[in-house]
Image (tube, rainbow, N blue to C red):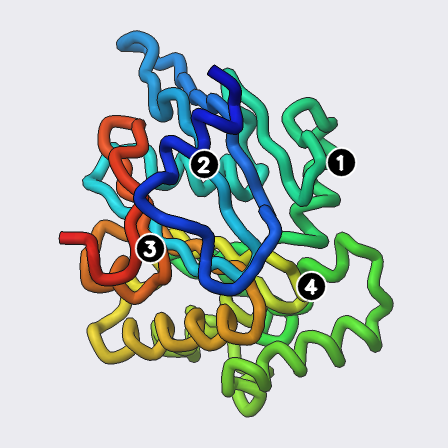
Amino acid sequence: MSETIILNSIEKKLERPQISSPILCELIAVSKEYSLDSGNVMALKDIHFRLYEKDFLSILGPSGSGKSTLLHILGLLSNPSKGRIFFKGQDVSCLSEWALARLRGQKIGFVFQAFHLLPSLNALENVALPLIYQRVSGGQRKRKALEALEKVGLARRSHHFPRQLSGGESQRVAIARALVSQPSLILADEPTGNLDTQMGKEILGMLKMLNEEGKTVVVVTHDVRIANEANRILFLKDGKVESLSSRGEAR
C-alpha cells in the first residue's frame, strides 16, 4: 500500500482545515526508540501524520503516550529512529544538526510549560535572544523584541526580570520570544500547565489569536477542555495515533 493511501486512510475521519491550506509538515512511518538501562522503549510507533499551514492542532493523550516526543520531532529537536519527515516539502530527515538548527530558528517557535526564561536577562533581552543566533544587529533585535512584547501586551514590562513577573506574564514573554523570528509554526508543550485557570484561558486565547492571524499552532495537553479549543485533535495512546478528530469530538 502506498504512503499516500496510508495517510488518507488514517485521516479518513477528518478532512483538511476548512481553509485551503498546503501541507506544512508531514511524518511518514515515524518511530522513536530510546535506549534505557532497563531496556529499549518505543515512544512513537509508525506515525503517519500531516500538519497543514494555518492549522490549530492539539495533541492529546495520557502521560507517557508520546505527546512531547511527537512535539520534539515536529519541532526538529529530535530525529526519528525510523521514518521520514518533510517540512514545507523538504525531506529534513537527513539534514545536519547545523541545517536543522537554522531551520528551527527561522521557521519554528517554541513555548514550554516551565517558560525557560534566563533569570539574568530582562524580558526584552530574553525575547531578543533567538535573534542573536541569527546574527541580527543590536538595534534590530531591540526593535523586533519590543514589537513582540507589544503584541502580547507586555511592552511596559520589557525591563523587568523573570523574578519580577507573574506566571502569566512569564508565559507571555515566552510567547513573544517564540514570535520574534516570525516563524510559520508555533509549538506549545503544556503552555497552561503552571498557570491558574483564568490565566490559562488568556494564554490559550493568545494562541488562538495567533492562529487566526495565520500561524500554524500545535498544543500538547492532557486536558480535554484545552484540546477541544483547537480545530483538530490528535489522540495518542502508547505511542500510536488512535484518532484524528475535529473540534468538540474529544472526550
Farthest residue in the bottom direction? Answer: 156
Nearest to the observer: residue 85 or residue 120: 85
Of the residues under marks 3 and 2, which one precedes in the sequence? 2
Query: According to the image, label 2 marks what residue?
Result: 49
| Mark 2 or mark 1, whichever is nearer to me | 2
Amino acid type of the residue that numbered disc 3 sits on in the rendered structure: Glu
* Contact between labelled residues 3 and 1, with CB atoms less than 8 Å apart: no
Of the residues under marks 4 and 1, which one precedes in the sequence? 1
Query: According to the image, label 3 marks what residue?
Result: 190
- Position of residue 1 measured from the top left corner of the image (x, y, whole percent): 47, 15
Query: Which residue is depicted at the point 21% across and 39% down?
Result: 63
Q: Real-space Cα distance between discs 4 and 3? A: 22 Å
- Position of residue 100 measured from the top left corner of the image (x, y, whole percent): 69, 37
Q: Is residue 110 above or below residue 74?
A: below
- Position of residue 206 measured from the top left corner of the image (x, y, whole percent): 43, 76
Query: Which residue is depicted at the point 38% across and 31% down?
Result: 9
Amino acid type of the residue that numbered disc 1 sits on in the rendered structure: Ala
SS label for mark 1? helix
In the image: residue 59, left or right of residue 218? left
Of the residues under marks 1 and 3, which one precedes in the sequence? 1
Q: Real-space Cα distance between discs 4 and 2? A: 26 Å
Of the residues under marks 4 and 2, which one precedes in the sequence? 2
Q: Is residue 34 above or below residue 166?
A: above
SS label for mark 2? strand
Query: According to the image, label 1 marks what residue?
Result: 99
- Position of residue 65 measured from the top left corner of the image (x, y, whole percent): 26, 33
